[in-house]
Image (cartoon, rainbow, N blue to C red):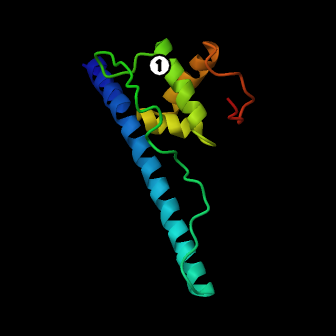
Amino acid sequence: MAEVKAEMNRMIHEDLTPLFDRIEQVMQQRIADALDRQRQELAASILGGAPAPATREPTIPDNNLAPHYEPSLDSRGRIIVNDEFLQNVADVYRSGGSQPNQALQQRFGRSRSSVSAWIRKAREAGYLPETSQGRTEA
């Protein structure tokens, strides 16, 4: 019985972790956008005139990165990591601007640890070059 309960807890955690990660990303983006609007309104009220356009880049890239590709899923809803998928990971990574990991998290709705594993596998397969830790050049 304990094994069944542990397996159920593990399955629930696997299913809900990407959802919670995505909710956190959206909340962070909305907070950042609200702060930008408040700064603009404050600057406009102090300086007079219309608020200046936002100069900050969005923290999470648009979700239309590589929209043509939908990964294959196994019977449990997990992404099947094959060459086609790793090529797409590399494409999204390169399109992700200064935050390629977040671009991948947003695109595929998966956790940071899953995304990191895919990037490592894409590097091992030769789809992405090796980089120094903390550097996103690809």
Left or right side of 131 for 72: left
- For this orientation, the residue located farthest to the left is 1
Q: Quadrant of the C terminus?
A: top right
Considering every residue shown, the one lying at the far right of the view is 132
Which part of the image, by quadrant, shows the N terminus? top left
Residue 24 x, y percent position in the rendering: 44, 48
Q: Depth check: 11 or 9 in front?
A: 11
Nearer the observer, 77 or 36: 36
- Residue positioned 46% across, 31% down in the render: 66
Find residue 53 and report its image quarter: bottom right
Residue visible at 36% across and 21% down in the picture:
78
Residue depicted at x 72% and y 35%: 135
Categorize mark 1 by other alpha carbons within 10 Å: few (<14), some (14-19), many (20+). Answer: some
Camera-side residue of 68 and 102:
68
Residue 8 horizontal/vertical position (percent): 28, 25
- Give the x, y percent position of residue 47: 63, 85
Find disc 1 in the rendering and name its residue.
85
The vertical placement of 109 against 59, above or below, is above
Quadrant of the rendered image containing residue 56: bottom right
Label 1: element kind: helix
Q: Amino acid at mark 1?
A: Phe
In this rendering, position of residue 98 left or right of residue 117:
right
Position of 62 relative to 94 (above/below) = below
Quarter-wise, where is residue 12 in the image? top left
Number of numbered discs on residues: 1
Q: Residue at x 44, y 41 (%)?
A: 63
